[in-house]
Amino acid sequence: MDIETFRAYCLSRKGVTESFPFDAHTLVFKVMGKMFALCALEKVPVFVNLKCDPDWALQLREAHDGRIYGAYHMSKTMWNSVEITQLPNDLVLRLVDHSYELVVKGLTKKLRTELEGL
């Protein structure tokens, strides 16, 4: 998957915004103000950080050694770095959905209600 496809998919999700809060090279996607994906645009190959259930994160790292690993500068328990150009598109999309859903699940009731109304 290329970065344009990844970006378009993230932005297609309800309530998602994109910004560069850290620097000019790190694109961040948030749902209702909470980060669910981060992409280092200057890195080759392209990788993204996605939130993940801790048990599944470990399974993914074992199954995709070198292509999915503990996220740099993030909690390695709940965040994976995923080399999106090296994995099947359907897996990348599933991981994006999973990250988005984990963040939505953690939103306050007020924010979830607001998201549902969008």
Image (cartoon, rainbow, N blue to C red):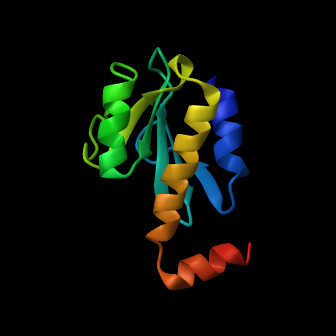
Q: Nearer the viewer, residue 18 or 60?
A: 60
How many badges with numbers are in the image? 0
Q: Residue furthest bottom?
A: 110
- Quadrant holding the N terminus: top right
Q: Is residue 44 shown above or below 89?
A: above
Instruction: Residue 65 in the image: state x and y as whole percent.
Output: 33, 21
Q: Is residue 109 shown above or below 52?
A: below
Q: Residue at x 63, y 33 (%)?
A: 90
Q: Residue at x 62, y 54 (%)?
A: 17
Q: Residue furthest top?
A: 44
Q: Is residue 71 left or right of residue 67?
A: left
Instruction: Residue 56 in the image: state x and y as whole percent.
Output: 36, 45
Q: Can residue 29 be seen from the camera position used here?
A: yes
Instruction: Residue 20 in the image: state x and y as whole percent.
Output: 51, 44
Q: Residue at x 68, y 48 (%)?
A: 11
- Quadrant holding the C terminus: bottom right
Q: Image quarter for residue 91?
A: top right
Q: Is residue 90 left or right of residue 51?
A: right
Q: Residue at x 54, y 85 (%)?
A: 110
Q: Is residue 88 left or right of residue 55?
A: right
Instruction: Residue 94 in the image: state x and y as whole percent.
Output: 57, 42
